[in-house]
Amino acid sequence: MKLTIFNAIHKELGAKMVEFAGFEMPIQYKNGIIFEHKAVRTSVGVFDVSHMGEFEISGPDALAFVQKVTTNDASKLFPGKVQYSAMCYHHGGIVDDLLVYRLDENKFMFVVNAANIEKDFNWCLENAKDFDVQLKNISDEINLLAVQGPNSLKTLQKLTDTDLNSMKYYTFQNGKLADVDMIISRTGYTGELGFELYFRGVFSVAKHVWDAIFEAGKEFNIEPVGLGCRDTLRLEKGYCLYGNDIDETTNPIEAGLGWITKLEKGPFNGSEVIAKVKEEGPRRRLVGFVSDENRFIPRHNYKIYSQGKEIGYVTSGNISPMLEKPIGMGYVQTEFSNEGTEIQIESRGKLFAAKVVKLPFV
């Protein structure tokens, strides 16, 4: 297993470590997932997400390349702006969802899911042949911390001269934080106020940044938080997880990602197929659902029914720490996707009642 630069710190803090996307990562620390989840929702928590992948794209054709391989309209980006996007295969299935950073006029950075780094980079290389661009996989060089929660800004502002308050959602600045050069990005996967910090450096640099953040956040009861609550936090906000809610068998329209799929920008990978799905209407849709049933946790691939008929399957599910009831997402046939539709989830041979709701849950 690969180790992030913060691995020894996690173990020192008593984290429960698991294999995730080829990395040894903390799933939770001593107080558990629900405690960590609530710490992020109510104050501030710090995730090590250094396992994520980063690619640099530079050269005269950088924008044209990004426009071809991603679904969103990268021409709307300016240096300092971030965009949520996706890459699709020619058949319209999703290669990955990602963040696109415009670093400079002719320089971009992709931030991709850890499990997809090699696949994504090979896909980019394959697509780069007709463009005057240079691609560099810098994933192993970048340390990445996500500081998330209502008190994240107050915590980090103590450590930087960059005016964090003036930063809009999905923008970034190059600055110093704890005297270390980094990209300070107003982004995150929790739905809370938060920042993601990209920086280079050896263990002593990484530990210095980690320690400085925890010292600054002490008055807010800052907590280290693991991948367990990263999943429950994103689920409460209805954010897609690659490999669960989206993959190469799903297209952006049925996945509810039409808002990051800009067909009007011109041709891109899969655009013809996606345009046809949009025009004809998808046969299924990704929906959110809530259940009032006790002792039931909806899990990936559980079957969804309506009046005895199988209509789809669960993609993500758990007990919401904030709502204290089962929530989930899943694909259902389009006619059953309306808000308020009564459905049933099969678990261990039993059917549990649930209702289609509008996202986010929280």
Image: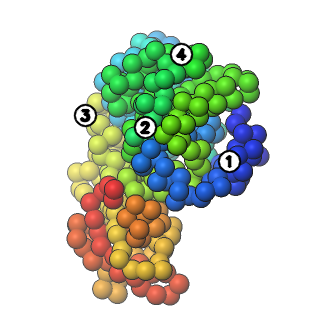
Q: Amino acid at mark 1?
A: Met
Q: CA distance from mark 4 to mark 3?
A: 39 Å
Secondary structure, mark 4, is: strand
10 Å crowding of disc 3: few (<14), some (14-19), many (20+) = few
Marks 3/2: CA–CA distance: 39 Å
The C terminus lies in quadrant: bottom left
Task: Identify residue type, mark 4.
Answer: Lys
Q: Nearer the viewer, mark 3 or mark 1?
A: 1
The colour scheme used to paint the residues is rainbow
Is residue 242 among what the camera can see?
Answer: no
Does residue 178 appear anywhere in the picture?
yes
Give residue 264's mark.
3
Residue under label 2, please give it: 151
Answer with mark 3 or mark 1, whichever residue precedes in sequence. 1
Q: Nearer the viewer, mark 1 or mark 2?
A: 2
Q: Position of residue 359 (x, y in %)?
A: 30, 57
Tell me the number on the disc at residue 25: 1
Q: Residues within 10 Å of mark 1 (few under 14, many from 20)?
A: many
**360 to the left or right of 131:** left
Mark 4 sits on what residue?
176
**Label 1 or label 4, whichever comes before in sequence order:** 1
Q: Secondary structure at mark 1?
A: strand
Q: CA distance from mark 1 to mark 4?
A: 27 Å
| Residue 103 on image: x %, y % | 46, 18
Tell me which amino acid carries mark 2. Asn
Closer to viewer: mark 1 or mark 4? 4
